[in-house]
Amino acid sequence: MAALRDIECFALVARHRSFSRAAAALGLSQPAVSQAIARLERELGLRLFERTSREVTPTTGGAALLPHAEAVLAQAAAFAAEAARLAVPAPQAIRLAYAPVAGGFAARVARRLAGRKPGLDLELVPAGWRAATDELTRGRAAAALMSAPFPPGFASAARFHVPLTHLALPAADPLSTASALSLDRAGRLLLPRGVAVPDGARLAPEAVDDPAAALDLVAAGRGALPVPQLLVDTVRRPDVRFVPMTGPPPRLTFALVWSAATAGEDVMDLVQAAQEALRR
């Protein structure tokens, strides 16, 4: 089988119509290129070039073989490129499910982790409480930034609280024009999971895993929803209004949750990044 370097010499001589120019392109001496062509011609049993004192031109056989030679060289280059790609280790990756209302903190954790461990790829997956719990228990996510109650059997760290400062009400509700409201005046409540139930509260049957997504239920008239300031600042929709709440606000408790039994070094780096992000 012809050597790849000899085929490359043949292709460049044919392209440049010159042994000297082909040698310069290859970084070889002209005699070395001449020897490569002679060796290839002997192996193939075929004359590849007509040589005169003024020029070098491919023979009929050489011209017919040239496209095949170039195809071989292209395949060899593709082979080398793919081998180089495979030789580089794939970046490590871990998956973090996070509550959308805590997305700002999740972003800070991601930046902190990137500074601690640049080679680690953190995949951020928005998930309400139920979806985050499912991600954890099925082992699809290494950790979850989620609200209480935290699933049993998992460790937690970097706890913080988010006060629910406003009530989301349907825009058509007469109470939506009030300057402020207490929970006991709001009627039926859509209460986020993990929030203590006020005395005498009338609860809607729907469980609220994600306050942002539950605004659709508010717009449909299913109940009033306590929400954090973040939603008040970022959500604009004509069918929902936000009214400040009076009295001590209820709050959601968030934490980074993970399986201590299966956590490796990357997960513990994530935990450390969350704790650092919380302190700053």
Image (spheres, helix red, strand yellow):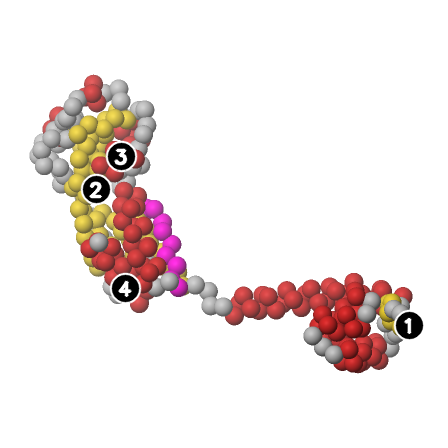
Residue 192 sits in quarter = top left
Q: Residues within 10 Å of mark 3 (few under 14, many from 20)?
A: few
Give x and y (percent) for residue 82.
58, 65
240 vs 70: above or below: above
Any mark on residue 193, and which?
2
Instruction: Indicate the secondary structure of the residue bearing disc 1.
Output: loop
68 vs 95: above or below: below
Any mark on residue 66, and which?
none
Q: Which numbered disc, 1 or 4, marks the residue closer to the eye? A: 1
Left or right of 21? Residue 261 is: left
Where does the C terminus fall, quadrant-wise? bottom left
Mark 4 and mark 2 lie on one chain; the one further toward the N terminus is 2
Q: Which is more toward the observer, 160 or 52?
A: 52
Mark 3 and mark 1 lie on one chain; the one further toward the N terminus is 1
The residues tagged by marks 3 and 4 sit, at their Cα atoms, a distance apart of 33 Å
Kindly identify the residue that appears in the image at 23 percent across and 28 percent down. 242
Residue 19 sits in quarter = bottom right
Left or right of 185? Residue 120 is: right
Instruction: Indicate the secondary structure of the residue bearing disc 2.
Output: loop
Q: Residues within 10 Å of mark 4 (few under 14, many from 20)?
A: some
258 vs 129: above or below: below
Residue to which mark 1 is pinned:
52
Determine contact: label 3, label 1, CB under 8 Å. Answer: no
Judge whether residue 76 is colored magenta. Answer: no
Residue to which mark 4 is pinned:
268
The residues tagged by marks 2 and 1 sit, at their Cα atoms, a distance apart of 89 Å
